[in-house]
Amino acid sequence: MNPLRKTAATTRTNSPAARCPIFVFAVLFPLLPFHHARAHDPGLSSVTIRPRPNGLEATLTLAIKDAAQLADLDEDHDGVVTQAEFARGRPQLEAIVATHFVVVPDGKSTKPESIHSRLDENNVELRLDFGVVVFSTLEIQSKLIASLPLGHRQYLQVQNSSGQMVAERLLSADRAIAQLTVATAGVATRDTVGSFADFVVLGVKHILTGYDHLLFLFGLLVVTRRFVSSLKIITCFTVAHSITLAVATFSLVEVPSRIVEPLIAATIVYVGVENFLRGDDPKGRQFLTFGFGLIHGLGFASVLREMGVGSRAGGVALPLFSFNLGVELGQIIIAAAALPIIWKLWARPVFAVRWAPTCSAAIVLLGGFWFAQRVWTN
């Protein structure tokens, strides 16, 4: 071999650009939340306000793990709240909710006349009955959010006496108060623009912190060399998860998260293994992406279901559309940032020989870890 050619090859292999992929993995890989890496742990709850003949009713729905943050429901700390444990912890929970969820009609704070709670398979539901009937303004203060994990969000929905949604807000720690102007008794004016923006932002944040969705997408794109191939993959993923996001949100299809979450991890493992078997830019991969995208859409839908979207009459179309739009915007941002780098790296032979397989191996390992974790914990 020509010594000059050998020296040049060695220089290319050891250059900073050639070492870039492994450097990126070395920096980013430890930052991934291995011990809590679930697709959907967003910290979400919902509140529905509706008028009743003799007053106003507020229904608060919390995930069991969030309710256990407010009161001591898991006495033996085994991660499971039984009906017996809930019965013993219910008075404490109801007392906390009664003092930390405040309804202020016409500027006058009022306490609930009664509160009832129940535990089902996934959630704790609390119903608060207030005696107020006629008012012109309504302020909702959810002081509970401050006691829940950082980043918790609460979907507030106001309905009229017919069960139609007339106002909605997305509350958070820095926006824990919603002020509504009432047009007629028990009917609030609707802030469509603000709610639309809230759900778009929620969708963007969800995809940017959905590490398993990101790894799945990265596994698909890391072996693509052409714009057309990448466009087909992204389009098929978008169409597929939009379909199942819609049908699951409308409760036309219901698949438990204990099944969906391991399946999502399995799709990551499969993609990583296929990268080894089929090499770079495999043909027809958009069909595989579409099939697996249907599974990921079921995962996206859990966000809206946890917030109560789709479980009650009215108010589904706007959250569904705006949340999905946010997911797509986040996906476009990620692809636009990653693809130029991936294509530039493919121009270097060492990437195809060494670093593309290294990336695929990391994808398989992390996907396998998540699969085992989710099967074990579920």
Image (cartoon, grey):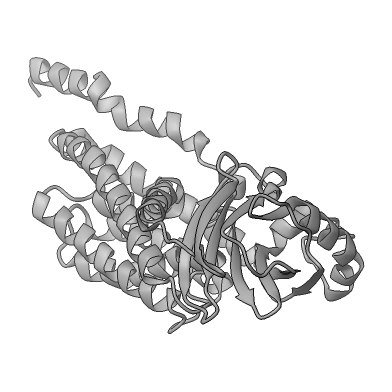
Quarter of the image that includes the C terminus:
bottom right
Quarter of the image that includes the N terminus:
top left
Nearest the camera: 132 or 166? 132
Q: Where residue 182 appears, x then y in whole percent? A: 51, 61
Q: Where residue 35 appears, x then y in whole percent? A: 62, 47
Nearest the camera: 273 or 3? 273
Q: Is residue 276 left or right of residue 342?
A: right
- Above or below for 225 versus 17: below
Quadrant of the image occupied by residue 321: bottom left
- For the point 39% across and 53% down, the residue is 203
Extreme residue toward the right, this view:
88
Quadrant of the image occupied by residue 300: bottom left
Q: Is residue 346 left or right of residue 277?
A: left
- For the point 36% across and 56% down, the residue is 196
Quadrant of the image occupied by residue 284: bottom left
- For the point 21% across and 34% down, the residue is 350
Residue 273 shows in this picture: no
Q: Where residue 66 appears, x then y in whole percent? A: 70, 56
Extreme residue toward the bottom, this view:
252
Q: Where residue 69 appears, x then y in whole percent? A: 76, 52
Nearest the camera: 299 or 58? 58
Residue 89 shows in this picture: yes
